Amino acid sequence: MENNDTTSFTLSISERGQIWQWLPQPLQASWTLIIFTAFAAVLLPAVTTGVYRLYFHPLRNIPGPKLAALTNFYAFYWNWIRDEGYSKRFGALHKYYSKIRYSSQLPVPRILNASDSPIIRIGPNSVHTNQPENFDAIFKVGSKWRKSDSFYKYFNGLDAMIDPAQYRTYRSHLAPLYAQRAINDLAPKLHKDLLSSAAKMEGHIKTGEAVNMVKVLRTLSTSMILHNLYSHDISLIEYDGYHPFLEAFEQLMTQSWLFVSYPLPAMLLGLIPGTSFAKFNASFTTFMKYCKDWNDEDMRIQKLAEDQELRDSHMKRYLAMDGNDSAKDKVVPNPLEDIFNFVAGGSDTTSYTLACAFFYILSSPEIYAKLVKELDENAPFIRDMFDYIRIQNLSYLNAVIKETLRISVPVPGCLPRIVPEGGTTLGSVYLPAGTAVSISQQSISFHEKIFPSPEKFIPERWLGNEAQRLDKWNVAFSRGPRQCIGTSLAYLELRCVLAYFLSRFEMALTGNCGDRLRWVDRFVAVNLDDVEIKLLRDRWN
C-alpha cells in the first residue's frame, strides 16, 4: 500500500512536467506572454533606469562608485547591512577619485586636476563635496538651498521640515525655551541631577566597580530634554538601574537606517517572532508607552493647574496656542509626535560628545592635569555656587569641548541640501537644479588645511592666535537659519557635566576602548565601545 502511494506520488511529480504540453496551443502562448510580460515589466524599467543613471544622467561625469550611481541601496548597504556608515567612506573615496579626470565631452566642464574640485557622486542624484568654501555657500544665512525631501521624508518634526516658512513658524514657537536666558535658568536643574548622579556613582569607589559613563551621561542629557518637553518632573536618574525608556531608545537606534530607508519592509520584518526585528518592535512599544504616559499626564496637569503654576515647556506652549492661528495650528505638532527627534537630537548627541570627551581627556595625562588645574582654580563657583555664567568662560574647558566636537562629530554624515533653481557651480563643476549636495561636518572637521594633524586630540589649537579663525569651522551644530535649536542647551550640559565630575572625582579609564573609540554612523554617531571609568576617590570628601 505504501509502495503504491509512493509510486502515485512519483508519477504525479513527473506528470507535472508534462502539464504544459496538455494545455491548448493558444493557452500555452498566453502563459508564455504573461510570464514574459511580467519579467519584462520588472527587468526593463530597472535596466532602462540603470542605463540612464550611468550614461545619460546630468551627474554621469562626476566620479564615484558605479553602484552608488545606480542605486541608493549602495548607501543602505554601508549604513545598515555593514553597520559602519556610508559617511565614513567619503574621505577615502575623495582620495581614490582624486586621480580621475572629468571628461570634456559632456555638459560637466573639464577639470585639469580633480583636486581642484573634489566632488564625488554618492547616489543616483547625490554628490558629496569636501570643499569648506562650499559649506559657506550652502549653509549661510539667506541660503536658498532647501533640505532634501527624499532624505528627510521619513523623519518628523522640526529638523525634517522642508518648507522654510513652516520651519520658521515652528522654531519661533519653541525659541523662547532654547534662548540663552532660558538655558541659563536650567543650571539649577542640571546641578540637582549632577548631585543625584554623583551620589549613585560614589558607591563605585568602595566596590571598585567600573562606571559606564555612556549610561550615566545619556540619563543626564535625556532628563534635561524631557524637562523642556513637559512641565512635570520625570524621574530618570532616581530610577534603580538603567531606565527601560533609555534601553528601548538604544535598541531603536540600532535599526535607524532600516526604518529611514525602507520603513514598510522594516515593519513587516518586525512581525516575525524571535528575530531582532521583533525585539525592535517590542522596544518601540516600550518607548511609545512611556512617551504616551508622560504626554497624557502632562496634558492632565496642564488642564488642572493655573498657567503661572507650571514651568514653560513644549506641552504648555502647545496647549496655549491660539486656535485662530491657522499657521501654527497646521505646523506645530503635539509634543508626542516629536519626542523621538528631540531625544535623539537633543540628548543622544550630547551624551555621545560627553562620553568621547571623558575618553580623550583621561587618555592624555597632560590634558587631564591641565584641565583639572583650571577647574581647581575656579572651584568656588563649581562646587559651592555652581555659577554657569562663570563656568562657561573657562578657556581650557571650552577648548577641550570644541576639540571633542571636532574629532567626535555628533552628526557625521549627510545632511543633504537641494541645488536651487538655475543650478549652481561648485568649484568648476556645474550641478543642475534638484541635485542633492552633501558636505558632511566630518569632512570639515578633518580637513588638513583647516586642522593640521586632524587625527590628534589637541585642545590647544582652539587657543591663542588661531582661535578666532578656527571658530568659524566649529560646525558641529551646523550653521545658518537651520542651526540646531538646542545648541545653547548642549553647551550648558557639556560645560557643566565635565566641570562637575572632573572637579569632584579623581578617575581613570578602564574597559576595552583601547587607544581609539570605535563608532558607527546611525544618522547620529554611536560608540561601539562603552566608555568605562574607575573612580579612584571623591576629591571633595
Image (spheres, grey):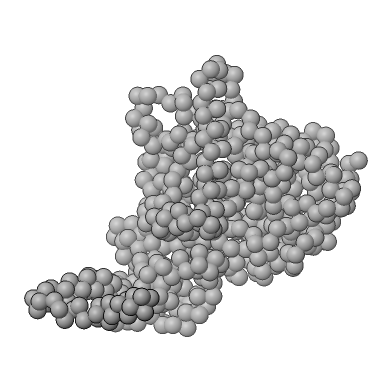
- Measured as percent of width and height from the top left, residue 163 is found at 36, 45
Q: Is 413 on the left or on the right of 333, as rendered?
A: right
- Measured as percent of width and height from the top left, residue 388 is found at 72, 38
Observer-nearest residue: 154 or 15? 15
Q: Is residue 32 above or below residue 490?
A: below
- Measured as percent of width and height from the top left, residue 530 is found at 70, 58
Q: Give the residue displayed 47% in from the left and 69% down from the top.
A: 77
Q: Is residue 511 above or below residue 22?
A: above
Observer-nearest residue: 353 or 440? 353
Q: Give the residue displayed 84% in from the left and 44% down from the top.
A: 202
Q: Quadrant of residue 220?
A: top right
Residue closest to the far front: 1
Residue 324 visible in this rendered orientation of the protein: yes
Q: Is 355 on the left or on the right of 117, as rendered?
A: right
Observer-nearest residue: 402 or 349? 349
Q: Give the residue displayed 25% in from the left and 78% down from the top.
A: 16
Residue closest to the far left: 26
Q: Is residue 169 above or below residue 454?
A: above
Q: Is 449 on the left or on the right of 539, as rendered?
A: left
Q: Quadrant of the C terminus?
A: top right
Q: Quadrant of residue 39?
A: bottom left
Residue closest to the far right: 541
Q: Quadrant of the N terminus?
A: bottom left
Q: Quadrant of residue 495?
A: top right
Q: Give the residue displayed 74% in from the left and 68% down from the top.
A: 515
Residue 470 visible in this rendered orientation of the protein: no
- Measured as percent of width and height from the top left, residue 391 is found at 74, 42
Query: How many marks can you see?
Result: 0
